[in-house]
Amino acid sequence: MKIQEIARLAGVSPSTVSRVFSHHPNISDEIREKVLAVARKYAYHPRLSSRQRNVVIITPYSSVYPVQCCVEMILMALTRELPRRGFRLEVLPQDNLERLDSIQFCAAAAIGAEPGDFASWSERFPVPLIIIDREAKKLSTEVYLVRSNEAQGMELAIDHLCRSGCRKIGCIIHGRPGTGNADIRYESIRQSLKKHDLPCDSTLIQFGNDEEYLELTGKLLRRNVDALFCPGGSGGILCAYAMSMFGRKIPEDISLIASEQTFFSRYGTPPQTTITPDYPALAGAVADVIEARIEGRKAPARTILPYLLIQRESVRLP
């Protein structure tokens, strides 16, 4: 179907249809919706153009909080990298995705979204969707993954604790089995502990949400662990608080590695050793996929980047 046919069915001129798809400000909401309704009915999508530089960032929250957790740190990196490459951004919470039907964009990037939520993406939109920080076995056409190497990140932390002399490591994985990256982290931690010939039974690897960290830390301390590894969420903050409640000192009594929290980890007492995704590299990989598709080039279905270790003072010296 050509733009002239869309115009005829909508009862407007071809130039008006063109203005609708290019977000011209002088188009009324009534006309815009009339044109878009015809386009949706006949599954019409305008061709990707190198001049179309609007990218939608899909977040899991309805509002953007202070930059502390992984989602916000990825968002910060994207808002630096994509405008630098000439893209315009619109941040859209996942509970408002119906807006995608009324705007024109050349790509979308979803932070921490479950790939199953976008199984029909290619049927609705002829533009790339990059899902950040998740894995999926099967991908729809024009759906791409950019994520950190969870197995390498877990091994990075366990290896550092092992080289520092820790011999009984307790772990609290933020989240629940079957959600996010929790299962990948569990299996990777178990394999890493086994590789280093350290105890790896299920009682030493726990899952938990924020309100459970105090109880779980107590359980692990009763198992006489000499280190804690807390990937995800605000585990570093919560475990540091829990150990103060149990009268344990970091790192004299217990070594601690957590996930990097931009506005806390370096300012903790003591400053916390962390693992962190390479956020600038993740944002750069997202931009690379978008540019490749706009230019008609093939993009890798998966881009997997290594974690980084930031050494501070919460792990005792060997």
Image: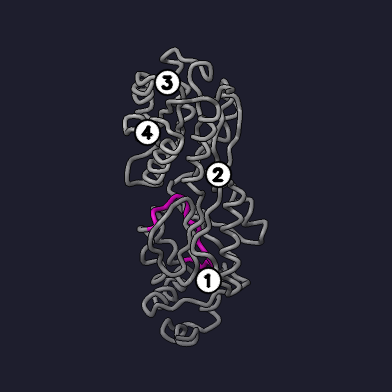
The Cα atoms of the two marked residues, 2 and 4, are separated by: 22 Å
Looking at the picture, how far across and down is residue 5, in whole percent?
45, 87
Quarter of the picture containing the C terminus is top right
Residue density around tag 1, few if under 14, some if 14–19, many if 20 or more, within 10 Å: some
Q: Could you tell me the amino acid type at mark 2?
A: Tyr
**CB atoms at circles 2 and 1 under 8 Å apart?**
no
Q: Could you tell me the amino acid type at mark 1?
A: Ile
Quarter of the picture containing the N terminus is bottom left
**Residue at horizontal 35 percent and vertical 46 percent from the top:** 179
Looking at the picture, how far across and down is residue 120, in whole percent?
36, 67
Looking at the picture, how far across and down is residue 129, in whole percent?
48, 63
Q: Secondary structure at mark 1?
A: loop
Instruction: Find residue 307 and name its label.
Output: 2
Which residue is more in the foreground, 314 or 129? Answer: 314
Question: Extreme front residue here?
Answer: 197
For marks 2 and 1, give the one nearer the viewer. 2
The Cα atoms of the two marked residues, 4 and 3, are separated by: 22 Å
Q: Secondary structure at mark 4?
A: loop
Mark 1 — residue?
27
Mark 3 — residue?
242
Residue density around tag 2, few if under 14, some if 14–19, many if 20 or more, within 10 Å: many
The Cα atoms of the two marked residues, 1 and 4, are separated by: 63 Å
Mark 4 — residue?
200
- Highlighted range, magenta: 103-115
Q: Secondary structure at mark 3?
A: helix
